[in-house]
């Protein structure tokens, strides 16, 4: 099983359509197929890798699992694609579905028994953008969403025909959904102009859906968001997409997760980070601070002589990944704040402190080192 990113293998974007996936795979298969490169093990390996990637991404369920969980979400033994990826196969195996889509091969999925084409068509998949707070994403939640979509017509049960009637076989194509056009030596199949490829016609359409078998409405759904989801994760709701045409199966709904920016925390995978401002007295002498976490406040001990930019790690105060693994940490970076709006007494005290620090010990090692470097720089000019 290849460990390279399947989208990278095919050279397509993560939002590539089925047509783009098929085109990319066909190009690679033509280039690397063993029949065209006999004895070349390197190109054979590339062919197997491309075949494996296409077999995963061309299957909507496997693609959804891969998009959400990566290679761990697609089991080659359970999915049955492992053996296919290992064999070379022939050109018929590679391009049968491609040419079948163009020329209406006998194996087309839209045909019913007896060679007639079914008018039922699967509904389209839908995408819904769900914006979550960081707290809800980390801890999980259940949200109600409203999705504008097509649903099956209740009056005709999705058939498109008025109650008491039913669709009839198209007289032009005989139910095949395609007609053959003869031009000289060439014979070309094309979509039937009478039934538009459905194979049936509706002489008495349903009044509610005008023969479409579905109507548009807003659908309210409950979405369970698992704890630990992150920006870009997708939640798939099977059968909650658009209703199919003429009683066909519904598509799926993909809930795309985005995370709102947080006033305190930033997220990086399973870790959280934040900045903690402290005054220079605490930085110099040390002390304790109350630090916020998503589970409540915790005490953080600041050692004496802490410099700005120092990062403290709070173990287990981050995020538990949705795909499993250890809980992350909270990284707290100290920022020493310069005091403002001082009164005269405070200014005098600071001046006295500064005067006392200007002689004797080196109280500012970084500053002294920097000044020495500047001095040497000008001496070397």
Image: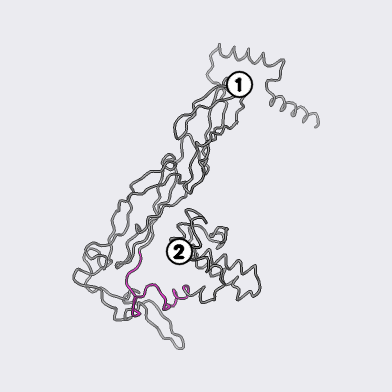
Above-or-below relation of 122 to 316: below
Above-or-below relation of 25 to 65: below
Label 2 vs 1, first from the N-terminus? 2
Residue 83 is left or right of residue 137, and the answer is: right
Q: Mark 2 points at which residue?
A: 59
Q: Disc 2 on helix, strand or loop?
A: loop
Nearest to the observer: residue 47 or residue 356? 47
Q: How many marks?
A: 2
Q: Residue at x 25, y 62 (%)?
A: 153
Above-or-below relation of 107 to 293: below
Residue 280 is left or right of residue 356, and the answer is: left
Q: How many residues crowd mark 2 within 10 Å: few (<14), some (14–19), many (20+)? A: few
Q: Quadrant of residue 332?
A: top right
Q: Mark 1 points at which residue?
A: 284
Magenta segment, which residues? 97-122
Which quadrant of the rendered structure holds the C terminus?
top right
Which quadrant of the rendered structure holds the N terminus?
bottom right
x and y percentages locating residue 314 in the rendered image:
53, 33
Residue 106 is one of the magenta-drawn residues:
yes
Secondary structure that dominates the magenta span: loop
Query: Mark 2 and mark 1: span between their CA atoms?
Result: 61 Å
| Marks 2 and 1 in Cβ contact (< 8 Å) | no
């Amino acid at each position: 099983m290849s460990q390279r990113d399947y989208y990278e293998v095919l050279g397509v974007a993560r939002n590539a359509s089925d047509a783009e996936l098929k085109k990319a795979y066909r190009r690679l298969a033509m280039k690397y197929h063993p029949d065209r490169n006999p004895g070349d093990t390197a190109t054979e390996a590339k062919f197997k890798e491309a075949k494996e990637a296409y077999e995963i991404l061309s299957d909507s369920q496997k693609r959804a699992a891969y998009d959400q969980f990566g290679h761990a979400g697609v089991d080659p033994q359970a999915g049955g694609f492992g053996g296919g990826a290992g064999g070379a196969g022939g050109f018929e195996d590679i391009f049968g579905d491609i040419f079948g889509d163009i020329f209406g091969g006998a194996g087309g999925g839209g045909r019913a028994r007896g060679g007639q084409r079914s008018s039922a068509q699967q509904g389209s998949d839908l995408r819904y953008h769900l914006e979550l707070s960081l707290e809800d994403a980390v801890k999980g939640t259940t949200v109600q969403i409203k999705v504008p979509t097509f649903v099956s017509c209740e009056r005709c049960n999705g058939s498109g025909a008025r109650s008491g009637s039913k669709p009839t076989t198209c007289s032009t194509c005989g139910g095949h959904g395609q007609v053959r056009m003869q031009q000289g030596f060439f014979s070309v199949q094309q979509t039937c102009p009478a039934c538009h490829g459905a194979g049936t016609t509706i002489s008495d359409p349903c009044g509610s859906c005008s023969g479409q078998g579905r109507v548009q409405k807003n659908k309210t759904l409950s979405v369970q968001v698992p704890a630990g989801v992150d920006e870009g994760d997708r939640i798939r709701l099977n059968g909650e997409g658009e209703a199919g045409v003429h009683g066909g199966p519904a598509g799926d709904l993909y809930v795309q997760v985005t995370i709102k920016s947080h006033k305190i925390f930033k997220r990086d995978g399973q870790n959280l980070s934040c900045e903690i401002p402290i005054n220079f007295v605490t930085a110099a002498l040390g002390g304790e601070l109350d630090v916020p976490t998503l589970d409540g406040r915790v005490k953080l001990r600041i050692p004496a002589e802490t410099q700005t930019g120092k990062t403290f790690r709070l173990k287990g105060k981050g995020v538990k990944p949705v795909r499993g693994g250890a809980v992350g940490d909270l990284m707290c970076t100290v920022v020493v704040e310069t005091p403002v709006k001082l009164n005269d007494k405070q200014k005098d005290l600071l001046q006295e402190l500064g005067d006392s620090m200007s002689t004797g010990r080196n109280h500012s090692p970084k500053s002294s080192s920097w000044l020495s470097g500047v001095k040497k720089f000008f001496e070397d000019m």
